[in-house]
Every structure is written in C-alpha cells, then in structure tokens.
Amino acid sequence: MRNPREVFALLGAQPFKAAAWFKPVRIASVVGARPQFVKAAPVSRAIRRHNEEVLIHTGQHYDEAMSDVFFDVLEIPKPDYNLEVGSGTHAKQTGEMLIRLEEVLERVRPDIVLVYGDTNSTLAAALAAAKLHLPVGHVEAGLRSFNRKMPEEVNRIIADHLATLLFCPTQTAVENLAKEGIQRGVHLVGDVMYDVALVSAQEARKRDIGKRLGLTPKGYVLATVHRPANVDDRATLESILRAFRECGETVVLPAHPRTRNRMREFGLDAGLPANLRVIDPVDYLDFLSLLIQSKKVATDSGGVQKEAYFFGIPCITLRDETEWIETMEDGWNAVVGTGTEEVVHAIRHFNPEGTKSKSFGDGHAADRIAELLESLP
C-alpha cells in the first residue's frame, strides 16, 4: 500500500501551505445532522485560521444527544444561527429550511456557502445559495449509490450540479462527477472524516464506555440502524432485529431516536433478547471507542462504513448498495441487504483478511478545503 502522501502527490494534490498573500473570505457553513457535525469539525478549525466563518445550524437534528453533545465533544464553535427547523416530511423540512436560510444568507452575504454530505440541510442550503447567486462549495462531492429512491442520492446529485467548488474524498468520486459532465471546480482533497478519525483515535481509546457497559473487547458486534428505508417499514426493521437476535453474538445498538420511535410504534421493543443491548445515542468519541473495540460492525450508515475501514473492523452493510465502493473492493465491507439469513450469515462468517489499499487521504483534507476556499476570485 502506498503512503497516502505519495498517492496525493501522484494525483497532483499537496498538503496545505499558507499563501504569501490572501484575501479573507466570509464562508457560511451550513450543518444540520450528526454526520455533518463530525465533518465540519476539522474544516471549521482550518477555515478560522485565516478567514471568517458564519456557522448555521438548521436544527435538522435538534435534541441534545444528536446535536449539542457533538458540538461539545468535537469542540465545534457555537452556531451563529440556529434555525430550529426540527423534524417533518422531506418537503416540509426542506421548505422550512429554504425560507429561513434565505433570510440568514441575505443578512450575512457570504462569499461562499459551504455544505456537507447529502441531507435535507445540504439540499436546502445549496438551493438557497443558488437562488441568491452565491457560490456553493460541497464537501463530500461525487458520491453515488446509483439508487435514486434514496433521498440522500437526490440531495447529493442536486448539490453537486449547483456547486462551484466540489471537494471529493476519493478518486472514485472524481470519476463519478466526470461521467455526469462535471469537471470544472472539482478537487480531490481526501476525506475529512479520516482527518477526524486520525485526530480522535487516541482520545477514543481512553474512553471507558465499553467497561461501563460490561463489554468484552472484541466480544460484541456494534450496530447502527437509522435510514428511513430500514426503520420506517415494520417488516424490514423486524428482519434486522431478528438477525441480531439469532446471530449468536452480543449486539450493541445505540438507537437513533427515529429507530426507538419505530420500534415502539411497531411493538418491537418488548421482550428484546438478552444478547441485544439497545442503548441511547452516544457522543462521537464514545462511539469511536465502541467501534475500535468491536468484533464487527453492522450498519446502514455511510460514515460508519468508512470508520470501520479506517480501523480495520469488518463491516456488514444493511443496504443493497453503498457509495463507498472502495471498502467493498478491498474486501472489508459486505453489502448484504436486510434479510435475516443474509445478515446472520455475514455476522457469523464474514472475516476479511489482508491490507487496506484504498486511499481516503492523508489527514489534511480540511486544510486543502480551506486553501481552495481562499482561492475564490
């Protein structure tokens, strides 16, 4: 495996170097959901070294366990604006965000609007900026699952086609954009989540959450289930929970509020087996600690697939496709769907071996993004 710095040198990208001159840039960063808080942490720090950032929280994830605790643990600055949109249908939530974002962006008048990932917050911010003729920067551009039934796929496609600067985490993402005719403003910067994982790993290993939960290192499977397709359909959610019950392993499930609500609504929260430990959501460092000490991971989260890969944890993806095909190509990610038998088989028998050859950067993606934002004309 090549050193990540060698890979990026071959691709023409270099770690950040401060320019001899620069014009301070006003950047409006829009976040709203737990994965975006993680991605924004290193980028916000890099931006604020030389420029002005106005941080806007849409309120898509609004309770303390899914929002406030992440700002505290990751030391993200307090948002300048919290739109407090809350939950709702995709149309209602996105519409409310558009109305409130337009008001804030007209007041702030940033040089560029920075969006992250693929949530409704991403879509609303990209649309609001485009309508106001403001440039858009998209962190984690170019990802494709090729499944347009996923709301996230629609959101990321629209954001990419509206963006002026597209910050790609992998070469695959660059190639995906080229196939759609998007080549201008495309930059391979690496994955900001890799930046965070590298910095956070040492602190995460000091956390005692495993001990507090009475877990044996490498003696449990860590699970996350939150996507609407998996939790809003009773049969699908029941199939996943049945697999956890029958797999023969201790399964630890930090339950997303949406998942908890559906389990209760569908009557699936009663009589849970002893091997399935459903716990409240945990902060980023506690989650990383649980992941690093786990035997395997079963998830429908894109971010968790990558984090498992970073730390060499076998990942079982509870979906029919993945944006992160690099993790599959290297053999560390088994995409098995949600059928009970398939999930049980993977938990029992999926044991990848070998090295991890795919590059997600060298830990300097946030610095590259900040440098490129400074290059705005």
Image: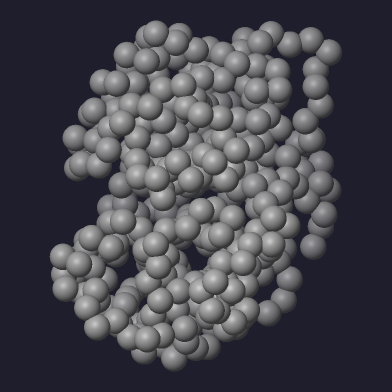
**Residue 189 lies in what quarter of the image?**
top right
Q: Residue at x 49, y 12 (%)?
A: 110
**Residue 108 lies in what quarter of the image?**
top left
Split into 4 quadrants, where in the image is the N terminus?
A: bottom right
Whole-percent x, y for residue 55 in the image: 49, 25
- Compared with 118, 376 (above or below) is above
- Compared with 302, 76 (above or below) is above
Judge from the rendering whether residue 24 lies leftward or rightward of residue 107; answer left or right: right
Whole-percent x, y for residue 49 in the image: 71, 22
Judge from the rendering whether residue 228 lies leftward or rightward of residue 274; answer left or right: left
- Residue 186 in view of the camera: no
Q: Residue at x 52, y 39 (%)?
A: 71
Q: Nearer the viewer, residue 346 or 28?
A: 28
Whole-percent x, y for residue 234 in the image: 19, 70
Q: Residue at x 71, y 52 (%)?
A: 198
- Compared with 231, 91 (above or below) is above
- Residue 375 in view of the camera: yes
Split into 4 quadrants, where in the image is the C terminus?
A: top right
